[in-house]
Image (tube, grey):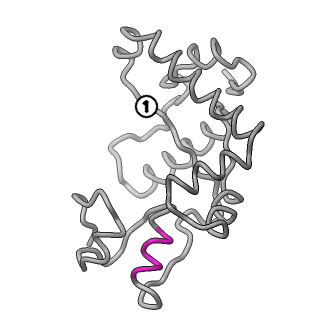
Amino acid sequence: MVDTKASDPAGAIAGGNVDAIVTWEPHVTQIRQQMGNTVIIWPAQSGQVSFWSVASTPGWIKQHPDLVNRFLRSLAQAEEYIIQHPVEAKKSLQKRLKSDDTYIATVWSQNQFSLSLDQALILAMEDEARWMIKNNLTREKQIPDFVNYIYVDGLKAVKPEAVKIIR
């Protein structure tokens, strides 16, 4: 059972509301600390790369292109800061997460901080769609052309070299 109302997975598990959950750091470590040896943890991605994506509706993007560009510029600046000042970036994350050096070193090495639209994202979406179709988890019978659903103009305006999608 997954408590979908829980905004804090670690709190939900500690409260006894969840039997199983798929989550990410820092929640995994918090759960491990709260539950000790009573919890079994294994990677849900089986070594596959995970992507964090930003989503919006086409209408909102069309009405707010300046906000989209400002947001993407701020992400590009954050990426540059992490590259230029890794020690300070780690310290900032450590303070925000209220964590120790060992934890930050572990999670930092598990992440790649880059602002991009990569062909690997399209391939991952196609693989997921294939799996959903094969397992009858959708009424669709064909894999959509996901490139048609991705807004590239904002990132092209802010960081053109980050757009690596084949059209």
Q: Residue at x 71, y 27 (%)?
A: 164
Which stretch did the figure color magenta?
A: 28-34
Residue 61 in the image: above or below residue 146? above
Q: Residue at x 59, y 21 (%)?
A: 73
Secondary structure of the residue carrying tag 1 is loop
Assess whether residue 67 is covered by the magenta stretch: no
The furthest residue to the bottom: 37
Residue 90 place in picture, x, y as percent:
66, 52
Question: Predominant secondary structure in magenta?
Answer: helix
Q: Residue at x 57, y 45 (%)?
A: 51
Residue 41 place in picture, x, y as percent:
51, 78
Residue 79 in the image: above or below residue 90? above
Quadrant location of the C terminus?
A: top right
Q: Crowding near pointer 1: few (<14 within 10 Å), some, many (20+)?
A: few
- Amino acid carrying label 1: it is Ala
Quadrant location of the N terminus?
A: bottom left
Residue 148 place in picture, x, y as percent:
51, 22
Residue 19 in the image: above or below residue 12? below
Q: In this image, 46 relative to 61: left or right?
A: right
Quarter holding residue 108: bottom right
Q: Which residue occupies the foreground of this view, 94 or 22?
A: 94
Assess whether residue 32 is covered by the magenta stretch: yes
User: To which residue does mark 1 refer?
Assistant: 55
Q: Residue at x 32, y 61 (%)?
A: 8
Q: In this image, 69 relative to 88: left or right?
A: left
Residue 62 place in picture, x, y as percent:
40, 9
